[in-house]
Image: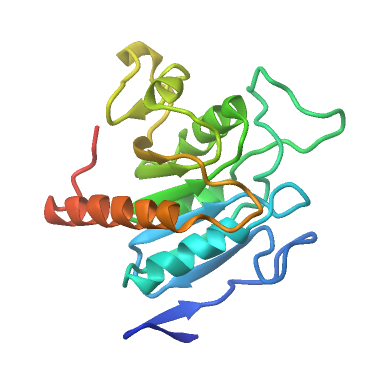
Amino acid sequence: MDEAIGRSSQIVDCREAQGIGEGGGLAQRGTISESERFDVVAVAMSPSKRHITKPICEITYGLREQGIRTSVLVLESGSGVPSDSPYGGAPGGTMAGINEKEILQIRRYKLALFHLGGIGGHVVYKAKTFLRYVDIPTIIVCEAPVDYEDFAKVGIITRLVRPPPDKVECLGTIVDIVTGVVRGVSAPRDKLNEIVIKVKFWLSKFEGEGMERVK
């Protein structure tokens, strides 16, 4: 699809394939909407009554409106909590995870943006699960008031706080965080602006440094 946004036209491959299971409209789980360039990938959790993809759609449109080539990946198993989370989940509930195909899809991009949820412990351990094998710079967008130290405590390298070398459990690096983005409702304009500014900054930084990673 050739999508005209403002004065910039972008080619977007709407969906790789129909998602498995029930999803919200086109944004079904296990699908990817690819831009013509591998610049930014926005990663959404699997749609459900609690995991509504509305904020990620608004974020994606906001980034594309600013000329940032952005793809959208909806995880096949993004809802629930990871198997190594100490918080557990509801009996019979789903387990969050990422498969090899999704890892390879994300690793093609210069920068990843993960939209997570409103429970701090869940956000941290989901990020750990998703970044364990995804070795690219990442911006975390969520509702929970988390900080870099929260992620470093579970073995994730972050821009400001790093775990001891023997405690590092992830290849990916968190370079920025945007909190206060509530799942399932429209994102405030100031939050969309904050996301756009941070994505532009890091994308330009990596491109200017020949894609040198923050490690």
Viewed as shown, does residue 48 lie left or right of 191?
Answer: right
Percent x, y of residue 13: 50, 77
Q: Nearer the viewer, residue 130 or 145?
A: 145
Q: Against 9, is 112 above or below?
A: above
Q: Coloured how?
A: rainbow
| Residue sitting farthest toward the right | 92
Give the quadrant of the C terminus. Answer: top left
Is residue 105 visible in the rendered image? The answer is no
Viewed as shown, does residue 139 lie left or right of 74?
Answer: left
Q: What residue do we see at 31% from left, 22% from top?
A: 161
Q: What residue do we see at 64% from left, 72% from top?
A: 17
**Could you say which quadrant of the image residue 204 lies in?**
bottom left
Percent x, y of residue 41: 43, 58
Q: Against 5, is 213 above or below?
A: above
**Could you say which quadrant of the image residue 31 lies in?**
bottom right
| Residue sitting farthest toward the left | 209
Is residue 78 visible in the rendered image? The answer is yes
Q: Nearer the viewer, residue 85 or 197?
A: 197
Q: Against 17, is 157 above or below?
A: above
Q: How many marks?
A: 0
Viewed as shown, does residue 144 lie left or right of 184?
Answer: left
Q: What residue do we see at 20% from left, 51% from top?
A: 206
Percent x, y of residue 50: 74, 47
Q: Nearer the viewer, residue 74 or 104?
A: 74
Q: What residue do we see at 47% from left, 56% from top?
A: 42
Q: Against 139, is 101 above or below?
A: below
Viewed as shown, does residue 143 lie left or right of 22?
Answer: left
Percent x, y of residue 92: 87, 33
